[in-house]
Image (tube, rainbow, N blue to C red):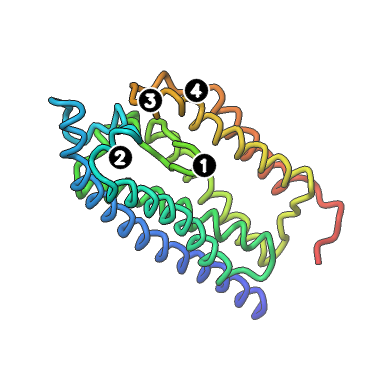
Amino acid sequence: MAGHSNNSWSWRRAVLALAIFGVSFGYVEAAIVVYLRHIYEPIRQQMHPGKPPGELFPLITTDQLKSKGPEHERLLLIELGREIATLVMLGGAALAVASNTRQWLAGFSIAFGIWDLTFYAFLKIFLDWPASLLTWDILFLVPLPWVGPVLSPCIVAASMVVGGVVLLKRESGRPVLLQPIHWGALVAGAFVLMTAWMWDWRNTMAGNWPNPFKWTLFAIGELISFGAFAHAAWMPRRVKVN
């Protein structure tokens, strides 16, 4: 019983640590967006007079950004680097609580999901944005712009938190066995989700309004990913996990 209690405490402590990191990082990320909007809102108003404050679309094109001076092109490169660094930080936080690949995946999922959800919560507090869960957002810029309604990343983030907590909790007793087919499905599902968000990249980069979001494609990606996890988590145990 003592050993079980220690294991139980360990996964709870890991979840708590990741939650603290995720919420704090969500605040930092939201604060950065507040600064970025303060910088770029005057440019958006010049390019699209009368556009409601907080409306991100149509996007400022690369050519429009360059026309405002080389410093803005430099800021864009810095922003791309910051987004990559964000993923590295989340991966590092997960590594701090993990002793195997499953635990790292769980830790990354929890940290990422809580960071993303609290990011939008803090934006609502700071800027009263988004107006609703169907408000469109620029989600990511690497390797191409990801755009979609705020509801879409929130669904994925919530799924990641649930899956991550289950993975970590099960490590203290009956670990979830992720076979190669599960890893493949998780990667495939993530690729489909990314495709849904990047589907309209040419149109949005050209400074046009986004076309309707590919909800069907998004749903397929979500079902593939979460379905693979659910199958691994609740399938009969046939292989011993060391």
Q: Nearer the observer, disc 4 or disc 1?
A: 1
Amino acid beneath label 1: Pro
Name the residue beneath numbered marker 2.
66
Q: Nearer the observer, disc 3 or disc 1?
A: 3
- In this rendering, is residue 141 above or below 218? below
Q: Earlier in the sequence, mark 2 or mark 1?
A: 2
Work out how far the residue at label 3 is from the one at label 2, CA to CA, in angstroms. Answer: 14 Å
Q: In terms of secondary structure, where does tag 4 sit?
A: loop
Residue at the image position 62 percent from the left and 62 percent from the top: 104
Q: Earlier in the sequence, mark 3 or mark 1?
A: 1
- In this rendering, is residue 121 above or below 200? below
Find out whether the residues at labels 2 and 4 contact each other: C-beta distance under 8 Å.
no
Name the residue beneath numbered marker 3.
206
Q: Nearer the observer, disc 3 or disc 2?
A: 2
Q: Earlier in the sequence, mark 3 or mark 2?
A: 2
What is the number of the mark on residue 143? 1
Work out how far the residue at label 4 is from the one at label 1, CA to CA, in angstroms. Answer: 19 Å
Amino acid beneath label 2: Lys
Amino acid beneath label 3: Ala
Residue at the image position 33 percent from the left and 55 percent from the top: 29
